[in-house]
Image (tube, coloured by chain):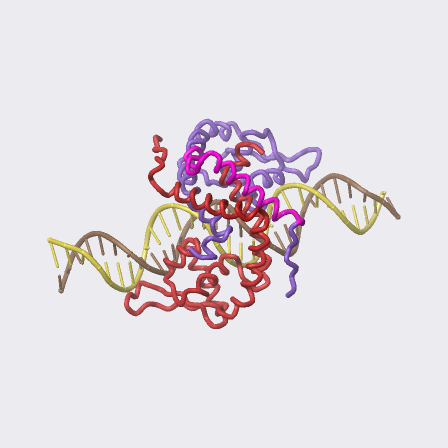
Chain colours: A purple, B red, C brown, D yellow
Amino acid sequence: MNEFDTSLSMLLHKTLDSVMPEFRALFARFDLTDQQWRVLRVLWESKKITSADLSARTLLPSPSLVGIIDRLEKKELVNRVRSVKDRRIVYVVASQKGRELETQVSPHVAAINERLERTVAPEEWLQLKELLLKVCDGMNNPETQKTPING
Amino acid sequence: MNEFDTSLSMLLHKTLDSVMPEFRALFARFDLTDQQWRVLRVLWESKKITSADLSARTLLPSPSLVGIIDRLEKKELVNRVRSVKDRRIVYVVASQKGRELETQVSPHVAAINERLERTVAPEEWLQLKELLLKVCDGMNNPETQKTPING
DNA sequence: TGATTTTAATTCATATGTGAATAATACACA
DNA sequence: TGTGTATTATTCACATATGAATTAAAATCA
């Protein structure tokens, strides 16, 4: 493997490619995409949440969320509730049917995550997560000088 | 951050989200998407390569590659060359125009990657990459027992 | 040789990602 | 009070992801 194959972004993609198919196969059994699951996963622990906050929690871009919530609404798993105080805001809420999925899906998700965690030693697992967060912080903070555009 | 936010798949997404915008802004200056750059990046060091191998190297799914190469062809950056020995195979080749991009883009890519690398200590950088590879191996190898589907 | 199977690339239908633009509403303030 | 500005969600245009199906061309073998 050369410079390109071992670049961080390629390794991140590669890791996701090795991890996600298993999750997707699971979610597909419940007629869910992984993005749809992410939304439900957040709603299971938030009574109501605005689209903006949902985007931040799920890491799904707002324009994508619109369609994702549309489809979840069509399946009657969530509802949109417009705020009365501020009519710009839309709260997304899990329906009863949407809440009932938690018990069925979550154990399988946990099982996959446990297998995932066992791919490295316990202390390595922690360090991997810490390093990823460190990279995020480092890229977001302006401390590390960005390369100026000189084109 | 709870269980969900610190799950590996979410951290991988989060890290990509913190890294990719900078690359995308760079590629956009050359009217390229990051996927299109990945194809060119591979072609810059391969005279010719089959679609299947290109998919493996770029980690781009074959159906996506079709459109990506279509658009690169339209911009006259690459060409499709059907093999004479085996007419099922299509080689993808960088055009002169496509090759000329290397000198202009690569230095900027290197600069971003250097900044990226400086977000963590040198030995952490190596370990991060090793751990990601270890996770990939662990998930792909059948050693670690997969959870059987009992639905 | 001719039927069968395998392989490489592509197509299809659907869902999502990306960046810019828009509509509706709230807010600040002269 | 009226007006400019900021905010929230959505829309738009385009590019890509996903999994299944298809097409064309080998390769296999009775």
Prevailing SS of the magenta stretch: helix
Q: Is the C terminus of chain B in the top left, top right, bottom left or bottom right quadrant? A: top left
Compared to residue D7, the image places residue D14 above or below, namely: below
Quadrant in the rendering for residue A146 = bottom right
Q: Foreground: D23 or B104?
A: B104
Residue A46 visible to an observer of this rendering: yes
Residue name at image x 44 percent, y 61 percent: B42
- Magenta residues, as a range? A114-143
Compared to residue B42, the image places residue A19 above or below, namely: above
Q: Foreground: B95 or D5?
A: B95
Compared to residue A96, the image places residue B62 above or below, namely: below
- Image coordinates of residue B48 in percent, x first then y, are 39, 66
In reply to whether residue A115 is colored magenta, the answer given is yes
- Image coordinates of residue A34 in percent, x first then y, are 47, 40
- Image coordinates of residue D18 in percent, x first then y, are 42, 47
Q: Foreground: B102 or A46?
A: B102
In the rendered image, the residue lying farthest to the front is B123
Q: Foreground: A29 or B83?
A: B83
Residue A74 visible to an observer of this rendering: no
Quadrant in the rendering for residue A90 = top right
Q: Is the N terminus of chain B in the top left, top right, bottom left or bottom right quadrant? A: top right
Residue name at image x 46 percent, y 46 percent: B130
Q: Taking C15 as reference, is B151 left or right?
A: left
Q: Taking B62 as reference, is B77 left or right?
A: right
- Image coordinates of residue A63 in percent, x first then y, are 58, 47
Residue name at image x 44 percent, y 36 percent: A121
Looking at the image, how many numbered discs can be counted on the residues?
0
Compared to residue B72, the image places residue B21 above or below, namely: above
